[in-house]
Image: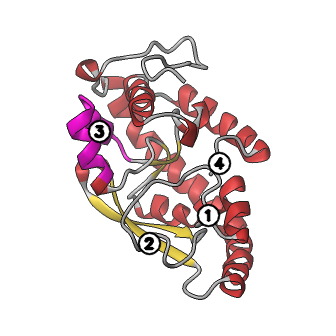
Amino acid sequence: MNSEKVYNIYHDYPIVEASNTRLSKHALQYLYIKRGIDIVLAGIGFLLSLPIILVFALLIVLETPGSPFYFQDRLGKNGKTFKIIKLRSMRIDAEKEGAKWAAKEDCRVTKVGKFIRKTRIDELPQLLLVLKGDMSIVGPRPERPVFAKQFSKEIKGFENRLLVKPGLTGLAQVNGGYNITPKEKLRYDLEYIKNLAFVLELKIILKTFKILFTGEGAR
């Protein structure tokens, strides 16, 4: 894909540049409603998904030794660091040679891991982080500090994606996920922030459900 072009599935929302990114007055007011929606959806979602989490936690332990859960530092709103939690989809020694992004057909991914990554089941424990307030249902995906530092040096305005809480899903995720570059992801994130509203978030959530059934963009 051309790194200079973003294929926007929501044509009524124009692509914005980093220098023009800021939260509108309407968006600032909507954040209070958004928090309420997050609590309701995350609460219901966690209760419904708890049996699924427990079943796959057991399958992970049966396949490979170690904790079924994976904790990792990520950057949240305004650059605050928090611990993300996922069901572990890789071997325990997956990063013995240092931090690196997941690749297509990554040999570090386990058999159970391949399934939970494709279906996004590995993301379900993050509903607890939404309830806690570290994350939101919709927003830019939380980046690792080591990669965020690198991208901030290479990509102008990369830090602007930290104007809002990171999300379980987002505009970049439903427009390619792992299959687009950090620069392309940033432009989607900035577009989301610039046009933050309930209608846009609803579109993203509906598109997310479609992806859950198709496995698009998973690694």
Q: Position of residue 43 (x, y in %)?
A: 59, 62
Q: Are marks 4 and 1 in contact (CB under 8 Å)?
A: no
Residue identified by numbered label 1: 107
Range covered by the magenta-colored residues: 147-165
Crowdedness of circle 3 by 10 Å Cα count: few (<14), some, many (20+)? Answer: some
In what quadrant of the picture does the N terminus appear?
Answer: top right
Crowdedness of circle 1 by 10 Å Cα count: few (<14), some, many (20+)? Answer: few
Residue displayed at 37% across by 23% down: 194
Question: Residue 146, labelled with which disc?
Answer: none
Q: Position of residue 37 (x, y in %)?
A: 53, 47
Crowdedness of circle 4 by 10 Å Cα count: few (<14), some, many (20+)? Answer: many
Question: Residue 218, labelled with which disc?
Answer: 4
What is the distance, in whole Å, between disc 4 and disc 3 at their CAs?
Answer: 26 Å
* Count of labels in the image: 4
Dot 3 falls on a residue whose secondary structure is helix
Dot 1 falls on a residue whose secondary structure is loop
Q: Is residue 161 left or right of residue 102?
A: left
Amino acid of disc 2: Phe
Q: Are marks 3 and 1 in contact (CB under 8 Å)?
A: no
Q: Earlier in the sequence, mark 3 or mark 2?
A: 2
Residue identified by numbered label 2: 71
Q: Earlier in the sequence, mark 4 or mark 3?
A: 3
Front tag of 3 and 1: 1
Amino acid of disc 1: Cys
Dot 4 falls on a residue whose secondary structure is loop
Q: Earlier in the sequence, mark 4 or mark 1?
A: 1
Q: Are marks 4 and 3 in contact (CB under 8 Å)?
A: no
- Relative height, residue 86 to residue 130 (above, below): below
Residue identified by numbered label 3: 163
